[in-house]
Image (cartoon, rainbow, N blue to C red):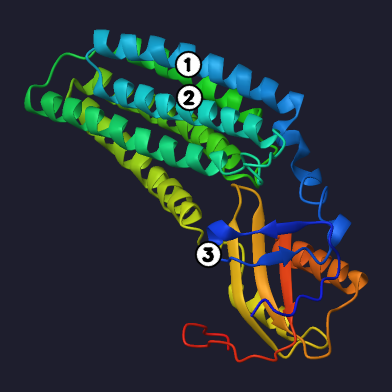
Amino acid sequence: MGAHHHHGSHDHEHKHDDKGHNHSHSHGHGHHHDGHGHHHHVDISGQGFNKAFAIATMANLVFTLIEAGYAIAAHSTSLLADAGHNLGDVMGLLFAWIASYLLTKPSSDRYSYGFKRTSILAALVNALMLVATCSIIVYEAIVHIVHPEHVNTMTVMIVAVIGILVNGGTAMLFMKGQDDLNIRGAFLHLAGDALVSFGVVVAAIVIHYSGWYIVDPIAGLVIVAIILISTWRLLRHSLDMILDAVPYHVDRNAVLDYLKIQPGVNMVHDLHIWSLSTNETAMTAHLIMPGGTPSDNEYARISTDLRKQFRINHVTLQVELGDTEVDCAHEQEC
């Protein structure tokens, strides 16, 4: 299959052995490859962004520890659940911070993609930690439903109001960079936290005027449900990325159709699209072109089109003349 390699350029030759390919791939778009996938993400790993991470992480960490302490002192499951929600976000911020720092590290001979994938790993670890936190809160809530305890509603109200201010303020730092899964996760979690803290205030007011202490653990369980719903999506997306699934924003069939209509292309096979990180997508494909390889300009145009239309940053195309029969047993596009 790899007998006919008419390369448009030799600037970027990758061997994708880890993807099950044992032949060389040539990046047809050569020197156009570098630098284009990074401009619109520059603020994510820039100094301003690291500062935002530092402020948000420290503020939330300090507050979470204080909140957990007051929750235990006030016998409040809802406040403890709020602290659990906050802890998940602090961990999320921390992992996303580490991942965004590693994204800036250059690639090496061994790590040819750099450390982009750590951002996916960060999202996965964060999701799993939130599940663990939830199980502790559920246990506490059940204990308090079975044996209702006096809840110090004033403490709960004051701490939860401070929570709204802390979370609301730090969420503002993440208004930019919404196209990265970790940044988006951090923003949504912080905004969600402010709402959850508001719910805790409401529950405390209800308990204060009605004396129904059972409202507190029930509110705690509602918060756990909220955490799990948001975590499920994070877990599913990060698992998909680890399994090299086609990213949600890419329509594989549309990419296939686009490649098929290129001048001189008779057939497309071995099309693979996967996530390099939470904000970069890679693609490889074999094009059967009996007339020979496209020019460097053609490669550059295809690359630009794929980036603009499908947000695919790294394109590797292998051109074959079609002399040999392609094994179509497992190829739906043959």
Q: How crowded is mark 2: few (under 14 residues within 10 Å), some or many (20 or more)?
A: many
Quadrant the N terminus occupies:
bottom right
Whether 245 is drawn above or below 181: the answer is below
Whether 156 is drawn above or below 108: the answer is above
The residue tagged with tag 1: helix, strand or loop?
Answer: helix
Q: Report the Cα–Cα distance between label 1 and label 3.
A: 43 Å
Which callout, 1 or 3, points at the residue further toward the start of the chain?
Answer: 3
Answer left or right for 33 relative to 174: right
Residue at position x 42%, y 53% from top?
A: 236
Label 1 amino acid? Answer: Leu
Numbered tag placed on residue 61 in the rendering: 1
Label 3 amino acid? Answer: Gly
Front residue (pair 32, 229): 32
Q: Provide residue 27's location: percent of width, then percent of height.
A: 78, 63
Residue position for label 3: 20
Whether 315 is drawn above or below 97: the answer is below
Contact between labelled residues 3 and 2, with CB atoms less than 8 Å apart: no
Residue at position x 84%, y 64% from top?
A: 29
Label 2 amino acid? Answer: Val
The residue tagged with tag 3: helix, strand or loop?
Answer: loop
As drawn, which residue projects farthest toward the left?
146
Numbered tag placed on residue 90 in the rendering: 2
Residue at position x 81%, y 88% from top?
A: 264
Q: In which quarter of the image is residue 11?
A: bottom right
Front residue (pair 149, 258): 258
